[in-house]
Image (cartoon, rainbow, N blue to C red):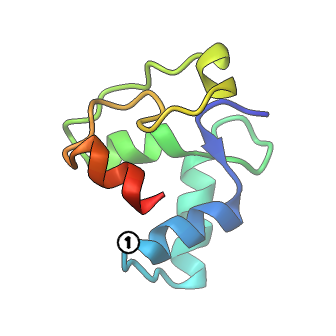
Amino acid sequence: MVIDHVTKSQFVKALSRLGVEPSAEQISLLAKKFDDDGEGMINYVAFCCAVDDQESSSLRSADAAKGNTLHGGFRDSRVPVDLLKRLV
């Protein structure tokens, strides 16, 4: 498992759930830009930092990734935790 990275498929699904439907060419460009290790995995944290100036880094470590963390190392959610738990 690669910490803070997602597959291209996971990335596209996440964007779609947010109502963002990039073209195949745009997805390819994003994947190229955020594949920082050349393994075909997208650095989701780097992407979030690029699109949200409030994000500066991930605090998540390999140990935290083994547990079930709601925020995955990002700053605290703007959505109340009890609401997030009901949605999961």
Nearest the eye: 28 or 43: 43
Q: Position of residue 4 (x, y in %)?
A: 58, 35
Q: How dense is the environment of label 1, judged by Cα within 10 Å: few (below 14), some, or many (20 and up)?
A: few
Q: Position of residue 68 (x, y in %)?
A: 58, 33
* Residue at (27, 32) in percent of width and height: 76
**In the image, what residue type sits under mark 1?**
Leu
Query: Does residue 85 appear left or right of residue 88 in this picture?
Result: left
Instruction: Say what secondary structure mark 1 lies in.
Output: loop
Q: In this picture, is 83 found above or below 63?
A: below
Query: Does residue 16 appear left or right of residue 9 in this picture?
Result: left
Q: In this picture, is 11 found above or below 37?
A: below
Q: In this picture, is 33 found above or below 60?
A: below
* Residue at (63, 41) in percent of width and height: 5
Nearest the eye: 85 or 26: 85
Q: Position of residue 47 (x, y in %)?
A: 44, 47
* Residue at (79, 34) in percent of width and height: 1
* Residue at (30, 27) in percent of width and height: 56
Nearest the eye: 77 or 74: 77
Q: Position of residue 11 (x, y in %)?
A: 58, 62
Label total for image: 1
Q: In this picture, is 32 found above or below 73?
A: below
Residue picked out by circle 1: 18
